[in-house]
Image: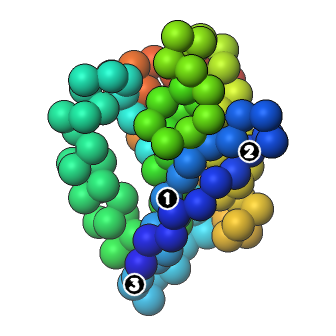
Amino acid sequence: MSEPFFFGPEADRLFGVYHEPTSMADRDEGVVIAAPYGRELMKTHRALRQLAIRLARAGFHVLRFDYRGCGDSAGEAESFDLAAWAEDLQAAADELKDRTGVGRVAFVGLRLGGTAVSYTHL
């Protein structure tokens, strides 16, 4: 089951989709999916959604989200900033922990999303 919602600071609300574990192997781990940017996001959206569904079937709590200025999140695309994306990743990890109580969060980053993960010192 997936649940769309908004989270993060009031000034820069982020749009996310939480995928609840659907297997009996409910793990104490969460996964935040760090998507790429622009055209690559459009081309990989379905694959990342399928990844989230499969991870949830394996018992992981999963959060997909849009960075500020992207998709359904607040902000302007022109305000792209890798440091801001790192803050968004931290907000997503915190949200996943608060929402589910998981003890650990892993990140799966693709293309620029992977760069943002490596830029983040989580």
Residues at discs 2 and 1 in contact (Cβ within 8 Å): no
Q: Residue furthest bottom?
A: 24
Mark pair 3, 2: CA separation: 28 Å
Residue 52: % across, % down? 36, 59
Label 3's element? loop
For the residue labelled by badge 1, is the local secondary structure a helix, a strand or a loop?
Answer: strand
Foreground pick, 43 / 21: 43
Task: First in sequence, mark 1 or 3: give its number.
Answer: 1
**Residue that label 3 marks:** 23
Few, some or many C-alpha atoms within 10 Å of disc 1 (few <14, some 14-19, many ≥20)?
Answer: some
In which quadrant of the rendered image does the C terminus lie? top right
Q: Earlier in the sequence, mark 3 or mark 2?
A: 2
Q: Is residue 121 depicted above or below 98 in this figure?
A: above
Q: Are marks 1 and 3 in contact (CB under 8 Å)?
A: no
How many dots with numbers? 3
- Residue at mark 2: 8
For image coordinates 56% across by 21% down, the residue present is: 76
Q: Nearer the viewer, mark 1 or mark 3?
A: 1
Q: Is residue 116 left or right of residue 50?
A: right
| Label disc, if present, on residue 17 of the rendered structure | 1
Q: Which one is in front, 90 or 8?
A: 8
Provide residue 20's location: percent of width, then percent of height.
Answer: 49, 74
